[in-house]
Amino acid sequence: MKKKTIAEQKNQMSQATDYRTWRMHALELDALESKDVWKGEAISPFYQYALIQQRLVNLKKWRKAGDWAQLIFSLREGLHRNLGNLANPELYRHTHVGTKYLIDEYITEVTSLLNYLCDNDIPELPYAEKMMFFRHTGQSFGRSALMLSGGANMGMFHIGVIKALREQKLLPRVISGSSAGSVMAALLGTRNNAELDALFRGERMDFHSWRRLGFREMVRQKSFMDIRQLEKFLRANIGEYTFEEAFKKTKRIINITVSPVDKHQHPRLLNYLTTPHLLVWSAVLASCSVPGLFPSVMLMTKDRLGQEKPYMASIRWVDGAIQSDLPAQRLGELYNVNHHIASQTNPHVLPFIADHTRKEGWPRFLTNLVKGELQYRSKQVLQLASYGIERGIVKTMLEGAAAIVGQQYYGDVTIHPKVQIKDYRRILGHVSITEYKNWILAGERETWPKITMIRDQTIIGQTLEDCIVRLKKQRNRHSPGSGATDAAVPPRRAA
């Protein structure tokens, strides 16, 4: 009877169409399998539970005593992203939803204290020092980014990931996209919150992005698909925003990767800092120009008077995923990003993605060893094959293939679809509104099991960012000495 009930709960989880329903069945399944007992036991070999316990006791003690000077000192000194190995994925593999209650209670206490310090007048923390405290602590803690990979039509999966994170208020402000991921990043980064629901429903969306060329055009353009049709699709759905205009509208920081055709150029990460006046649709067009499918393109920008003109007219650009599918290093340099949520849909990557829900052991170790060796040897063979060729399309293709093989396709949290052969057959070509919605739901369902881990790894950094924004708004109306009573600690966060 119990086995039947467990099977029913698993089936209900797999059929859920919203996070609330999925979570309800996940909690019931944890109870049926006695996994909630594991949550209540602080002891585990996967993190420093004694350190976290002691810090939690101290924070509560100092708060109750009103010892704000000691609290501020302790928070400034001890807030680190992976303190005590709290970010260990093993802590999220034992249950269907949630982790140790100790971890949940510690993170809740820290965020509660940060919000209190931000929103109340503390004699030991004048306004100028308070702003410095949050800026320095935030710089030390780092921030998160969402990275969207390439994947042609499979990239619609990213919209489901975005939707699930946004509904739980976990969507990072920094978003990168390459190839198909650049389309989804641009759709997000040019729409304000009021416009996103229509995007998730597919309303007012033009899905006609593909048109196969005739034989003569294929020969002339050295590509199979019509770049003009793709440009029409992008301009219709993204609009004529520059990166700077998109940032001012949404406050989201979108980043598009492009790869140069010229070997003397380097891959670029286009955004409101590096290319503020570049047209977003133009960056996406370049990032989607897969060699062979589409020709290389010239980027377009706006001049001082707002007129469209070429950007570095002598340089042509192609698919960003070739050399920088997930630009983690550059995001760290520009935005202090040290935590990466990757949504991975590249068709050539998906068969090799490890199942991170599997427990550690010899089978997993050997599987990863074989995959790593295959990747390394493939890169060596491709590099060796290109050495004897001076120039031309063959050398370019071999060097591009070596760059693709040698990349890192994972994040701290990696979300990817479960695909079948039929999905590969539909990787190119127009999609229907039904297919679009199915991909979105697939993205949501793959994100829900990761929500707790993402929240625990990002909520402190997000709170620090939010506090800085609120403090900036307080600057003009700040008045020292206004009374404030201690805020109650909020109840335990939902997993």
Image (tube, rainbow, N blue to C red):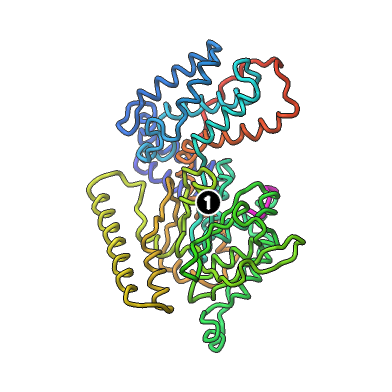
Assign the N terminus to one quadrant of the image.
top left
The amino acid sitting under disc 1 is Val
**Which residues fall within the magenta stretch?**
189-194
Q: Is residue 197 above or below residue 316?
A: above
**Relative to residue 245, is residue 72 drawn left or right?**
left
Residue 493 x %, y %? 52, 31
**Residue at x 55%, y 77% (from the top left corner):** 225
Helix, strand or loop at label 1? It is: helix
Any part of residue 313 in sight: yes
Residue placed under numbered mark 1 in the picture: 161
Q: Which corner quadrant of the image does residue 486 belong to?
A: top right
Q: Residue furthest bottom?
A: 216
Closest to the observer, 41 or 389: 389
Q: Is residue 344 above or below residue 233?
A: above
Q: Residues within 10 Å of mark 1 (few under 14, many from 20)?
A: many
**Relative to residue 147, is residue 35 drawn left or right?**
left
Q: Is residue 163 above or below residue 309?
A: above
